[in-house]
Image (cartoon, rainbow, N blue to C red):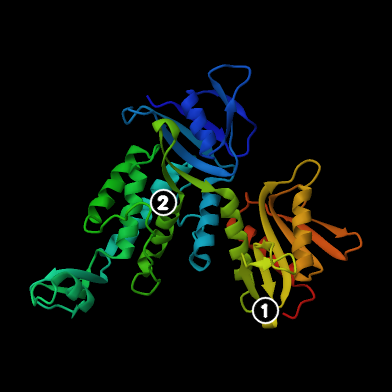
Amino acid sequence: MTPTVEIVEHAPASSHALPDAVGRALAVGGIIDASPDPYAPGRWLLRAGSKVGAVAITMPGGEAGEAVTVRITPKVPIARLFFLLGYSLDPRRAWRDGQVDVAEHRDLLPALAHAVERQIDRALGQGLLQGYRPTEETALVVRGRIREADQIRRRFGATLPVEVIYDEFTTDIAENRILRTAVERLLRLPGVPNGARRRLLHQRARLADATPLVPGRPVPVWHPSHLNARYHHALHLARAVLDGISADHAPGGLRIDGFLFDMNKLFEDFVTVALQEALRGTGLTGRLQDAHHLDEAAAIRMKPDFVLYGPELTPLAVADAKYKAEKRDGFPDADLYQMLAYCTALGLREGHLVYAKGNAPHTAHRVRHAGVMIHQHALDLDQAPAGLLHDITALCRQMCVGLPV
């Protein structure tokens, strides 16, 4: 039976019996904080940061079942995590409660496998999407147009065969290839329940004519349209799967397979996209991760999570999202210093730090001799999506107080 280690995101370090090679692989891979337990030989102190999910570390030469599985449980309820993910990927068609039914699942990976399979099943309900795909081949008849440069280089002036390129109407298009690859990756992950695995195998059979993507190569681009509208939810979720998949060879010949969400990035994406959506109809513009410079020589670059611009792209407000809870003695001071730097470089009198949770919904600090006010906001992620979006809208309104809206 595969040994399983269960830890919780951002929980205190706990001691676990692990082979030294596995402990070192966890530490080197940056998956969790891992160090030998100084009081218990053969045990390792493990502490999860902001990455949640599951990884399986297979010993060299071992069979498929000879692996150690590490599961990192998020503090955020699974249903809420999927809402944050769905909204950050597609805010106008976000997954509200019930649209992606994951309530029965307590672990991330089973919920993810279930959600992907359900969304793919809905996408393929009317059959596989077809489209035109550029195809190059060597043929005995001219189809499409001749690739003249390849014809000269490969055929040295010979008439036949002909190097041609044409648009083929096929199911082997980017949309189906992305879905097929997401299914393939999920089937290789530890912790996918047998029921979900059987249904994923069925979806793989339906997508058999789509070519899986090559690992390490860019994911093909697809463009939303009315033709592929039924695929949108499935494609967004499949892309999240592909972005979170890891398959690496660790030192010593160990293999690491798994799926990990970075809650820092998920929270940051949700907050900034939701702020951008809250600005609709105001005439103002919000940009995410816009590059600026701290110094006049433009040598020190900085990228605030969200900058609000007015006419002629004049900075009006700045915000940064921090997925961390308030400590007993307050939020980290380093965040205040960072926001002060943003405000100074952008010429702003106020800055906004947005946290995942806190003892109070809002606090503010006026910086001495600078005339800068730094606000610290706390979002309660345990509440329903409607309440969460209401709080974001209220935050946006506070950022816009006194601005030409």
Secondary element under disc 2, as helix, strand or loop, is helix
Q: Residues within 10 Å of mark 2 (few under 14, many from 20)?
A: many
- The correct choice, above or below, for 73 with respect to 93 in the image is above
Tag 2–tag 1 contact (CB < 8 Å): no
Residue 298 quadrant: bottom right
C-alpha distance separating marks 2 and 1: 40 Å
- Residue 378: horizontal and vertical position, in percent? 72, 53
Q: From the viewer's perspective, is 359 left or right of 36?
A: right
Residue wearing tag 2: 115
Residue shown at the point (61%, 64%) measured from the top left: 289
Task: Identify the element where label 1 is drawn.
Answer: helix
Residue 71 spot, x, y in % from top left: 49, 35
Q: Nearer the viewer, mark 2 or mark 1?
A: 1
Quadrant (top left/top right/bottom left/bottom right) for the N terminus: top left
Can residue 191 be seen here? The reply is: yes
Neighbor class of circle 1 (other Cα within 10 Å; few <14, some 14-19, many 20+) is few
Can see residue 361?
A: no
The residue depicted at 37 percent of the width and 75 percent of the height is 226
Position above or below: 339 against 277: above
Q: In this view of the protein, which residue sits in the foreground, 27 or 331?
A: 27
Q: Where's residue 398, x and y in %?
A: 75, 67
Any mark on residue 313, and which?
1
Dividing the picture into quadrants, the one containing residue 268 is bottom right
Q: Is residue 389 left or right of residue 127?
A: right
Residue 114 image offset from top left, x and y in percent: 39, 47
**Residue sitting at the far front:** 156
Is residue 376 left or right of 163 when viewed as pictured?
right
Please name the amino acid that badge 1 sits on: Leu
